[in-house]
Image: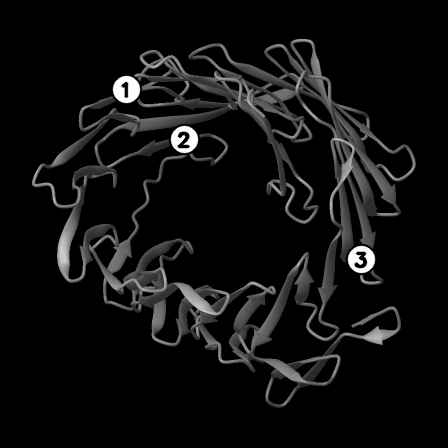
Amino acid sequence: MGVHNRNLLSLDFDRITRTEKVYDDHRKFTLRIHYDHAGRPTLWAPSSRLNGVNVTYSPGGHVAGIQRGTMSIRMEYDQNGRITSQIFADGKSWTYTYLEKFDKNDCLSSVTMPNVARTTLETTRSIGYYRNTYRPSEGNASVLQDYSEDGQLMQTTYLGTGRRVMYKYDKLAKLVEILYDTTRVAFSYDETAGMLKVVNLQTEGTTCTIRYRQIGPLIDRQIFRFSEEGMVNARFDYVYDNSFRVTSMQAVINETPLPIDLYRYDDVSGKTEQFGKFGVIYYDINQIITTAVMTHTKHFDAYGRVKEVQYEIFRSLMYWMMVQYDNMGRVVAKELKVGPYANTTRYTYEYDADSQLQVVSINDKPLWHYSYDLNGNLHLLSPGNSARLTPLRYDLRDRITRLGDVQYRMDEDGFLKQRGSEFFEYSSAGLLVKVYNRVSGWSIRYSYDGLGRRVSSRCSPGHHLQFFYADLSSPTRVTHMDTCSPWS
């Protein structure tokens, strides 16, 4: 495979041994794949210290077993190709049975939990659309979702409280509008390339606008503008290399340019070698992140799981953690040390037959105990050194109603409405918009952009926190925050 006249990936296939080898652009061997007579892969063997993966198949062509080091799972199927059992490395197994009961479209029509609570699902057709109906085990809180004949979601309606969200599309089947409560979200696209250009949210007299500027398929600038009082605007500019990777990002928040973040990548592997002020060094599968002040080291085991983590500040070890796993992939022990002069604390974890956490011990002394109901909900725990058992209670829809002395209440749609003296409010889109305490009097309000991301929080004393999202590869990750208070 070549990019910009450079060979980045090479494949060699031996027909006699049915083996494929993968090389990087320096002809360094990285992965070997073996195939059976039917052309199905049976072995992945990397060149690194990571364990290989072996796969076996049933006579019907289904995956019958997966083996990786000491971890394994075996599957059995019925004559219809449906899985009937899974056997794990510790010898425990899950079995599956099927009821020959479907709706007229051969779709799932109900789910019955171990406590006999039953949820039903139904699909009905009408002129120009079809409707999916979800009915929970109790109450009148059905949820309706209407789809066009092309499979586009047209609206979602919660019958419990009357919440409703509507969606509109253009002739090219692109989403152009979302309506709920007093909120309107409009999407506009580039007429030539068809790429998203503007996302504009309007609600209760305020607006939030996101603008994208593209160079070909790449976004080289995104702008956030807010009309709400106290909100600041922001702009993020991006530069790319010949492999379409971001090499620099310039943030300008409230008209103040921030230091440019630089990114550098390894020419062979493509791994990140620098992001901002942080440098990254790779030793086989291990990783070290460094600055002039600190060093963050991660060691991984042969399964790619974190085995050891440590932080050094000015060459003084401030944090160290070691993790151990069993052959089911569960964490069974952890050793932790925080601070240069602290003693090491050892945590051990025990699980029940269903792999649910049952006991947590600290320095070999059992301190936390957990037990579960038939549906897998945590229903009893004993915290710390307390001899008192804390019960948890749930309704038929598996929603928590009590934790010890704290009462929980849900609204008809299943959203948390009350936790003790704290109350919660949501928009019809399911976004948390307000939290308040009737006893202490404090409250927090949240606002969102047109993509459903939280952009600000305001608490009752006047503190204001604003969030920005500049990572194009992970658009829901907060990258920048701006804060102000009445005393600043």
Residue 103 locus on image (x, y percent): 44, 30
- Residue 244's label in the rendered image is 3
Asked whether residue 41 is in view, the answer is yes
Please state which of the two labelled residues, at mark 1 or mark 2, is closer to the viewer.
1
Q: Quadrant of residue 269?
A: bottom right
Q: Which comes sooner in the sequence, label 3 or label 2?
A: 2
Quadrant (top left, top right, bottom left, bottom right) of the C terminus = top right
Is residue 142 rendered to the left or right of residue 26? Answer: left
Which residue of the protein is positioned furthest toward the bottom in this rendering? Answer: 16
Q: Are marks 1 and 2 in contact (CB under 8 Å)?
A: no
Is residue 210 rendered to the left or right of residue 153? Answer: right
Using a 10 Å C-alpha cutoff, classify the residue at mark 3 as few (fewer than 14 neighbours), some (14 to 19) or many (20 or more): few
Element type where label 1 sits in the image: loop
Q: Quadrant of residue 404?
A: top left
Please state which of the two labelled residues, at mark 3 or mark 2, is closer to the viewer.
3
Residue 220 locus on image (x, y percent): 83, 45
The residue at the point 68 percent across, 46 percent down is: 471
**Residue where numbered disc 2 is placed:** 109
Which residue of the protein is positioned furthest toward the left in this rendering? Answer: 387
**Residue where numbered disc 1 is placed:** 420
- Residue 484's label in the rendered image is none
Element type where label 2 sits in the image: loop
